[in-house]
């Protein structure tokens, strides 16, 4: 839908007044001194009631500004919004719009006035985790440290196993044994034990988010396994069987890419002294991998919900879920080659 420019002290979008002129002028100099930590837009178009940023729902998936207009909504691509309201690229609002585009990789909806995601400010995650993820994250790094100091391998399959592992007195003793050994290797100085413990806790915190993503990825894998089961259920229905097979083929590449990212995390965990020696670099790497995995899994969020209650039996719900999954994959991962006549 086209945007309307500002006129007669009012801001119009799609022919509807969505904001009025401010009665007091904006102190631009004072605003400029503020660090960009919030989406504090200055232009009145962004004060429209209920307005928010998101990705468009069509195949383009481009950043748009959406304003509810009664029973419908005004949807304007950001580049058209900038043209319509003379928002320059290097202006305050222009810089914020660039941040909106980056932020929509990590969150689905952004409203003017909200805080800029931590991923873009200081590297922290903008999304929440549960206690079970913290247990798994701390458990992963503890498991690596104990294996390193003892030379033994431990098998932990789930959260309950990990909680028992962390409570084990022998494990606690091995962690205490590892502290001075790591401090000596790292040459950390007088407060070496405290610093090793702080780094252990910090790595556990970062890995907690990786473990939350690993849990979410398990839901995508469960979706894939359910479709494999449907291959057997629909083995006599040639058309449906072909659809399932095509969908599974398309799933293979994106899931392998996510597996590869988790593999990079696991590879780093194998070298315990390096985790502590180049701590800051390891945290940066874990955060980069976390963000890459999160961005990829965020696209699957809707399908995870779609498949959550699909029964493993012949039914229209299963067919609809499979076809929706195929459309999702085809839009993103089908590659086409342009045929050219030989000259």
Image: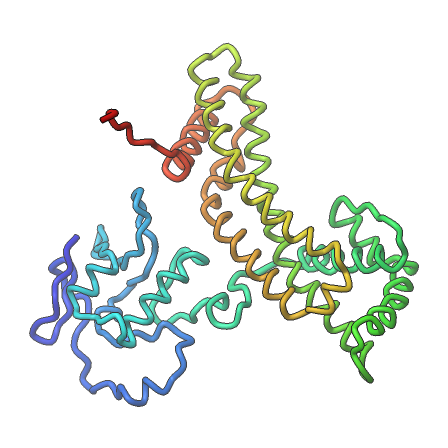
Residue 244 rendering spot, x and y as whole percentages? 48, 23
With 66 as the anchor, is 143 left or right in this view?
right
179 over 24 or under it: above or below: above
Q: Residue at x 65, y 64 (%)?
A: 282
Name the foreground residue: 239 vs 282. Answer: 282
Identify the image's colour scheme: rainbow, by chain, secondary structure or one colour: rainbow
Residue 32 screen position, x and y as percent: 32, 85
Residue at left 47%, top 39%? Answer: 303
Q: Residue 254, position in %: x, y? A: 50, 40
Question: What residue occupies the far left of the structure in this picture?
Answer: 8
325, above or below 341, in the image: below
Residue 149 position (above or below residue 238): below
Q: Quadrant of residue 17?
A: bottom left
Q: Is residue 126 left or right of residue 21?
A: right
Q: Residue furthest top?
A: 236
> Residue 24 vs residue 257: left or right?
left
Work out whether residue 108 or residue 48 is closer to the camera in this orientation and state it: 108
Residue 258 in the image: x percent, y percent?
56, 45
- Tell me the residue at 48%/26% (across/down): 318
Q: How many marks?
A: 0
As drawn, which residue projects farthest toward the front?
343
The residue that appears at 52% across and 72% down in the rendered structure is: 122
Q: Quadrant of the C terminus?
A: top left
Q: Which quadrant of the figure has residue 166?
A: bottom right
Residue 190 placement, left or right of 90: right
């Amino acid at each position: 839908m086209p945007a309307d420019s500002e006129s007669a002290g009012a801001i119009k979008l799609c022919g509807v007044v969505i904001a009025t002129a401010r009665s007091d002028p904006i102190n631009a100099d004072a605003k400029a001194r503020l660090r960009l930590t919030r989406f504090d837009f200055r232009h009145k178009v962004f004060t429209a009631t209920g307005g928010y940023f998101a990705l468009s729902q069509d195949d383009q998936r481009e950043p748009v500004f959406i304003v509810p207009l009664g029973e419908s909504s005004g949807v304007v691509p950001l580049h058209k919004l900038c043209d319509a309201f003379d928002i320059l690229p290097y202006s305050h609002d222009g810089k914020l719009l660039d941040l909106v585009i980056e932020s929509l990789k990590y969150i689905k909806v952004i409203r003017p006035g909200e805080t800029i995601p931590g991923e873009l400010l200081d590297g922290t995650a903008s999304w929440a985790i549960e206690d079970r993820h913290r247990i798994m994250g701390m458990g992963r790094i503890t498991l690596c440290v104990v294996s390193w100091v003892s030379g033994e391998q431990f098998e932990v399959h789930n959260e309950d196993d990990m909680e028992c592992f962390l409570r084990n007195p022998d494990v606690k003793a091995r962690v205490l044994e590892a502290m001075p050994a790591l401090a000596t290797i790292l040459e950390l100085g007088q407060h070496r034990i405290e610093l090793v413990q702080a780094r252990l806790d910090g790595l556990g915190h970062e890995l907690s988010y990786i473990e939350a993503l690993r849990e979410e990825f398990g839901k995508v894998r469960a979706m894939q396994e359910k479709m494999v089961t449907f291959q057997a259920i629909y083995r006599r229905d040639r058309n449906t069987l072909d659809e399932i097979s095509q969908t599974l083929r398309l799933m293979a590449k994106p899931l392998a890419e996510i597996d590869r990212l988790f593999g990079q995390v696991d590879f780093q965990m194998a070298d315990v002294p390096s985790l502590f020696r180049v701590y800051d670099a390891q945290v940066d790497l874990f955060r980069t991998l976390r963000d890459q995995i999160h961005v990829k899994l965020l696209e699957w969020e809707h399908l995870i919900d779609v498949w959550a209650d699909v029964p493993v039996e012949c039914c229209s719900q299963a067919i609809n879920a499979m076809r929706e999954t195929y459309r999702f994959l085809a839009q993103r991962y089908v590659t086409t080659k342009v045929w050219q006549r030989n000259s």
